[in-house]
Image (cartoon, helix red, strand yellow):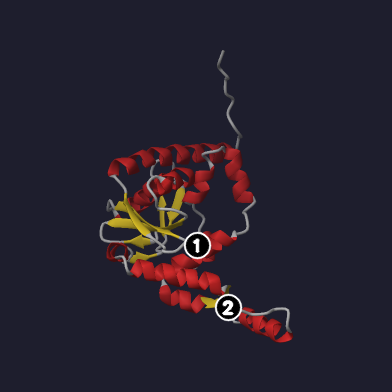
Amino acid sequence: MTDSDYSTIPALRRSALWELRKSPAHYKYAVEHPEEPTPALLFGIAVHMAILEPERFKDEYIIAPKIDKRTKAGKEEWEALLASGKNVLSQEDGDTIAGMVEAIKAHPEALALLKGEHEVPIVWTDPTTGEECKCRPDVIGDGVIVDYKTTSSCENGAFERDARKYGYQLQAAMYREGLLQARLQEFGFAFVAQEKTAPYAVRIYRCDPGWIDDGVEIYRDLLDLYHKCKTKNEWPGYEEVTMYGA
């Protein structure tokens, strides 16, 4: 299933639910005004495909050689690349992706974790709210869900900060819930994180069940809030607060 096909499934996804952490108004605006993919996001999509679906990557991407688009010949060569119907990557990005693929291949534990079912869409009905939810795990392995992440750093504490900022705990909880509802099986969760600069170091983060359980509380709170707002068709902004101090 392509990304565009997955996006058309009428169900709530983790990235949208995470917007509710600010306020329902932020969620509603984000859904109604989707942002254009950033270069960083597009690069991440390409890396994911190269790592998890290498044959599909070859079919959908092409590496552009160095082309002087100021010349007639260069313009024609560039137009030919665009006409191929494939996504065009710069030579620099292509080299980086190739280096990242090789670093993964040289890491036996990461390579083993990334084997399994790739990019399978999971759709379920939440038994409490009746809301339709969806997820598409990078990898469904033997008793574990694995998510591949690119990052600026895997140094101690760096990826953990990313996890808090981008809602990885919510992701682990929601994906585990989705697999439990769809397959009646409880899975563990792990991240395979890789730096985007040489030597493209890899680090594995296995999620403690208690950490995921805490994420379930976040998931339930946000899903219940979404259901309440949807039912009333009310999407308020920030709540009022009282300021204290001397």
Direction from residue 118 to residue 75 in the image, left or right: right
Residue at 47% across, 66% down: 47
What residue is rendered at 57% in x and 44% in y?
27
Q: Amino acid at mark 1?
A: Gly
**Outermost residue toward the front?**
199
Nearer to us in this view, 81 or 74 = 74
Spot occupied by residue 65 in the image (x, y as percentages of width and height): 58, 80
> Quick one: SS at disc 2?
loop
Q: Looking at the image, is mark 1 or mark 2 earlier in the sequence?
A: 1
Q: Amino acid at mark 2?
A: Ala
Q: Is residue 207 above or below residue 234?
A: below
Front-lying residue, 89 or 211: 89
Which is nearer the eye, 214 or 109? 109
Q: Percent position (x, y) of residue 150?
A: 45, 58
Distance from disc 1 to disc 2, alpha carbons, whole Å, reads 18 Å
Residue 123 is tagged as: none
Give the labeled residue for mark 2.
64
Q: Kindly identify which residue carries mark 1.
A: 44
Placement of 150 over or under 47, stated as above or below = above
Taking the spot 59% from the left edge, 82% from the top edge, the residue there is 84
Q: Callout 2: 10 Å neighbours few (<14), some, many (20+)?
A: some
Q: Is residue 242 left or right of residue 69?
A: left
Element type where label 1 sits in the image: helix
